[in-house]
């Protein structure tokens, strides 16, 4: 079992997409291990996106992330990092396939609704940054109905 960091960005919160996005991950068979609605400081957003600090869109990206509350979550499941990225869709909504979250709900790369960790390593870093308080230890009673032994 693996964990990933998923964040519904301020546009996703404003547009009322929280319930739908959580439903997709729940129905897939992943487990919610932590969740909070927060508005982050500029310095925190810069830390989260530190790898992109040299990009020309970095300033706009930080503005976007601090523009309102986000829903930060940790999801657990087999292959959840890679599968989560597929469920989210390509970075550019013009290239995200219909059926993916960005494919269904986004038009602009700078308003692409959701973030998901891109590797197991970055998931670990992002979870430590966003949830220093730790995660809930629980497993669904449905586990044997979703996963083989
Ligand atoms: P992700 O992992 O699919 O979210 O994509 P990246 O890690 O490459 O970029 C992080 C976020 O920066 C994206 O989700 C977009 O919101 C934003 N972003 C990436 N590329 C561009 C771009 O070319 N222009 C703008 N305005 N935003 C971008
Ligand atoms: Mg990324």
Image (spheres, rainbow, N blue to C red):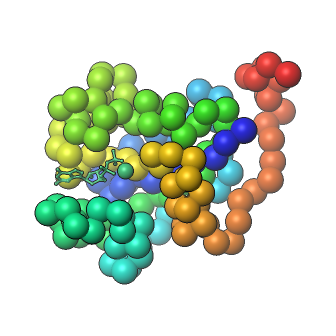
Residue 20 seen anywhere in this rendered image of the structure:
no
Whole-percent x and y of residue 12?
Answer: 34, 49
Whole-percent x and y of residue 147?
Answer: 76, 23
Name the residue nearer the viewer: 2 or 106: 2
Whole-percent x and y of residue 23?
Answer: 54, 35
Residue 141 seen anywhere in this rendered image of the structure:
yes
Tell me the residue at 34%/73% (across/down): 46
Q: How many numbered marks have been drawn onto this rendered protein structure?
A: 0
Tell me the residue at 39%/43% (across/down): 17
Q: Against 87, is 76 above or below?
A: below
The quadrant holding residue 68 is: bottom left
The quadrant holding residue 96 is: top left
Left or right of residue 40: residue 121: right
Name the residue nearer the viewer: 86 or 24: 86
Whole-percent x and y of residue 77?
Answer: 67, 36
The N terminus: image quadrant: top right
């Amino acid at each position: 079992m693996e964990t990933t960091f998923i964040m519904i960005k301020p546009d996703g919160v404003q547009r009322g997409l929280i319930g739908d996005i959580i439903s997709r991950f729940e129905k897939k068979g992943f487990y919610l291990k932590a969740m909070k609605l927060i508005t982050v400081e500029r310095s925190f957003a810069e830390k989260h996106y530190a790898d992109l600090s040299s990009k020309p869109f970095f300033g706009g990206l930080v503005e976007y992330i601090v523009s309102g509350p986000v829903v930060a979550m940790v999801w657990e499941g087999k292959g959840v990092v890679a599968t989560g990225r597929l469920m989210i869709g390509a970075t550019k909504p013009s290239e995200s396939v219909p059926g993916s979250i960005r494919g269904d709900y986004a038009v602009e790369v700078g308003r692409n609704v959701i973030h998901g960790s891109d590797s197991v390593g970055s998931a670990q870093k992002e979870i430590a940054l966003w949830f220093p308080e730790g995660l809930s230890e629980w497993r669904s009673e449905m586990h044997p109905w979703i996963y083989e032994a």
